[in-house]
Image: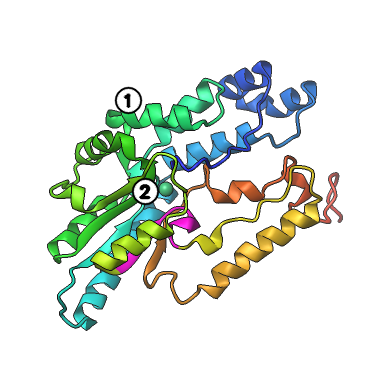
Amino acid sequence: MPASAVSRKRRAVSVVLALLLVTSPGVVAAAATATDEPSCPYALGTRSANVYVQTSAEYRACCRSIYAAAGYRLEEMLEDAEPGPVRPAVVMDIDETVLDNSSFQTFLYVNELEYTPELWSQFEQEGIDEVGMVPGASEFIGRAESLGVAVVYLSNRNERNLDRTVAALAGAGLDTTGIGERIYLKPEGASSDKSPRRDAVAARYNVLMYFGDNLRDFSDVFRPARPSADAPPEEYLAAIEARNRAVEDASCHWGVDWFVLPNPIYGEWEKLTPESPEAIFRHSAMETGEPAE
Ligand SMILES: [Mg+2]
């Protein structure tokens, strides 16, 4: 979870709806009608995404696939690399890339809270024992370290909570030896754009790979051009298409030296979702009722 003021578009739902969502998923449709909420409230989407991350074996397998492929790729890159004076490194975002903070999402959900930087900072300080590891991350990090590659952490966590973040990494079983030389957090009041810190890392190490769950972990060209709240659906679709094109333009990186971990709960993509996502969904021409003979 970046402290980068990823503005949550999660819709506030009524107390009645929230209680029904928690206690009885089967009555969601009726609750939505009764409270005049759209049929796909943000709270429901977030809830399902957190279920996916916390319970699905598919999420686990997906993350392991990415880290296993990255491990093979790293060995291949090192075989091809000319030995040089600059130490090779991999640059890793922390939240939902290395550490699993889904208990924070559960906290927001059960308490009917919107994300705020203040609540996140509180979790950075108090949630050390609640974080887990993204599947495959510890094995990849161990593999990189055994190959002599520096593991550099580049995160938008608060720099003022540095000691707590280091404690969270150590508590998750990661080697934090010399971490002060290889962790770059966001100074108070600084931009969430990681580019200057990426440049600082690149000046110090021979960076072979980047890992993240947010495309801005790789480049700020992926920063979404957020439409205004009252913008028409076409404007949202155009912004989505522009971001998709930027991904296609970077095809030479994906799975080669840029590795993306799935995060269906939150991210920059939320900024390109209108209040009523139905307005931009792909729809079917199929009609309800008896299927044709
Ligand atoms: Mg992250």
> Which residue is found at the position 31% from the left and 38% from the top?
132
The residue singled out by tag 1 in the image is 126
**Of the residues shown, which amino acid type is indicated by label 2?**
Ser
Could you say which disc has been placed on residue 155 in the image? 2
Q: Is mark 2 within 8 Å of ligand 1?
A: yes
User: Total of numbered circles in the picture?
Assistant: 2
Q: Earlier in the sequence, mark 1 or mark 2?
A: 1
The one nearer the camera, 93 or 49, is 93
In this rendering, the label closer to the viewer, 1 or 2: 2
The one nearer the camera, 289 or 40, is 40
Q: Secondary structure at mark 1?
A: helix
Residue 82 seen in the current view:
yes
Which region of the structure is painted magenta? 208-218
In magenta stretch: residue 79: no
Q: Is residue 267 left or right of residue 228?
A: left
x, y percent for residue 75: 22, 72
